[in-house]
């Protein structure tokens, strides 16, 4: 495992899952310090998601699922209806933390629907069931990332250099990552893969997180300013672009960290394949195309005064979308745990997001 577990559920008493609490790497402190947040407080979990202490679409979903399980514990042990009500209240609250990553809503819907289906249980059994489900959300994400890594590694040749934007690695998921997973698998297969990591303004997920986690894993990584991506492509140094996603619409349009769309255009201009890697929990078949994806806007100070140092004049007007949408026409393939999807993405996404979808159907 390249980095410690990004988010996990820690039972407080041996032999039982509940009561328990959430343990998360505090990603705002990386790379200076590997520190953890331990909490069962749903407000602290909301704040951790909002402030990007835990970030990356799948990791947000896992933290939120665990937040619901933690909140349910506060209800009385003789009142199952109160446990369900506490779980629902927490889910509604956590849904307001960030708007773009669909994994958040996917995980919360899953927790709410389990609570609704478990009404016949005693309160302690309900609490245990919710904690187990939150752990399952984590474990399933880890398995999906492994599979994405295996499928994606087949797209990489020995000696390839990959460019990535933001952090879609182990820190953004249960473990292993989505866009970085093929790099880890390929390295394990003995392929020599090099990586250019875009620094990813304004919050520097590429500089602070991707380069850190790749170095931890012994992968050859070179950090570049976002503005250098065109030049390294023009110099013929990049064989493929691998990025994650926060939400993939029904037609394959993919939202990811601001700057990703520009990287996709550059890749297209240089004839470099641009791959999006994401689990089916990131797919949103109810949103027909990218125009329906809500793009989070973040505070001006993240651009003008990032990391405590003023880099723009006081009072300057700022527009700070945190994500952009890459049109599906620029995407060479979408790699999910069920296969390597190629156009027509509408058909392929409908197939893999159907509950009974056969794993090989999308190859
Ligand atoms: O604002 P962030 O850091 O949560 O944005 C994260 C990204 O854009 C990731 O690329 C995306 O969530 C995929 S994570 C596997």
Image (cartoon, helix red, strand yellow):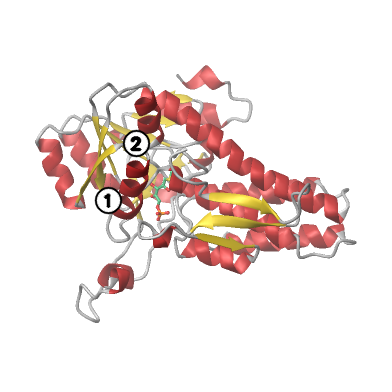
Precedes in sequence: disc 1 or disc 2:
1
Instruction: State the residue at coordinates (23%, 46%).
Output: 262
Q: Tell me where residue 344 appears, x and y as whole percent.
A: 40, 26
Q: Is mark 1 on a helix, strand or loop?
A: loop
Nearest the viewer among 296 and 67 is 67
In the displayed structure image, the side of residue 91 where residue 61 appears, left or right = left
Q: Which of 327 and 103 is in front in this view?
A: 103
Q: In this view, does 87 lie to the left or right of 207?
A: right
Q: Do the residues labelled 1 and 2 touch (CB within 8 Å)?
A: no
User: Spatial distance from mark 1 to mark 2, Cα to Cα?
Assistant: 16 Å
Residue 342 visible (yes or no):
no
In the image, residue 234 lies at what x, y percent? 10, 37
Q: In this view, does 361 lie above or below 330?
A: above
Element assignment for label 2: helix
**Would residue 142 be visible to someone looking at this image?**
yes
Q: Is residue 358 above or below residue 35?
A: above
Of residues 335 and 100, the one drawn nearer to the viewer in this rendering: 335
What label sits on residue 351 in the rendered view?
none
Q: Residue furthest bottom?
A: 314
Camera-near label (1 vs 2) is 1
Vertical position of residue 215 compared to residue 239: above or below: below
Neighbours of disc 1 within 10 Å: few (<14), some (14-19), many (20+): many
Residue 143 sits above or below residue 47 on the image = above
Residue for badge 1: 259
Q: Mark 2 points at which residue?
A: 328
Please identify the quarter of the rendering in which residue 318 is found.
Answer: bottom left
How far from the left and from the top, in percent, is residue 215?
Answer: 32, 43
Q: Tell me if 174 is positioned left or right of 124 in this view.
A: left
Left or right for 279, reference 40: left
């Amino acid at each position: 495992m390249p980095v410690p577990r990004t988010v996990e559920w820690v039972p407080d008493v041996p032999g039982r899952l509940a009561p328990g609490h959430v343990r998360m790497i505090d990603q705002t402190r990386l790379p200076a310090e590997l520190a953890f947040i331990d909490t069962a407080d749903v407000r602290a979990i909301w704040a951790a998601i909002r402030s990007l202490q835990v970030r990356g679409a799948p990791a947000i979903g896992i933290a939120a699922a665990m937040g619901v399980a933690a909140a349910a514990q506060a209800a009385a042990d003789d009142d199952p209806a109160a446990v369900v009500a506490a779980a629902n209240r927490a889910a509604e609250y956590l849904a307001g933390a960030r708007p773009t990553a669909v994994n958040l809503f996917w995980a919360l819907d899953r927790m709410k629907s389990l609570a609704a289906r478990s009404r016949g249980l005693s309160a302690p059994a309900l609490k245990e069931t919710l904690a187990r489900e939150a752990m399952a959300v984590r474990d399933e994400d880890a398995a999906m990332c492994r599979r994405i890594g295996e499928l994606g590694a087949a797209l990489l040749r020995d000696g390839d250099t990959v460019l990535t934007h933001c952090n879609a690695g182990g820190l953004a998921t249960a473990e292993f990552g989505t866009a970085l997973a093929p790099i880890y698998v390929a390295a394990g297969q003995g392929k020599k893969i090099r990586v250019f990591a875009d620094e990813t303004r304004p919050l520097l997920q590429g500089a602070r997180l991707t380069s850190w986690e790749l170095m931890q894993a012994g992968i050859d990584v070179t950090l570049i300013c976002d503005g250098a991506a065109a030049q390294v492509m023009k110099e013929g140094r990049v064989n493929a672009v691998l990025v994650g996603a926060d939400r993939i619409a029904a037609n394959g349009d993919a939202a990811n960290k601001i700057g990703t769309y520009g990287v996709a255009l550059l890749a297209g201009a240089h004839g470099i394949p641009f791959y999006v890697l994401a689990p089916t929990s990131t797919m949103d078949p109810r949103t027909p195309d990218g125009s329906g994806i809500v793009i989070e806007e973040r505070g001006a100070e993240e651009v003008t005064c990032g990391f405590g140092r003023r880099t723009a004049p006081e009072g300057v007007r700022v527009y700070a979308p945190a994500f952009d949408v890459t049109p599906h026409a620029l995407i060479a393939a979408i790699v999910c745990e069920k296969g390597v999807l190629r156009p027509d993405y509408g058909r392929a996404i409908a197939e893999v997001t159907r509950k009974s979808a056969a794993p090989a159907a999308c190859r």
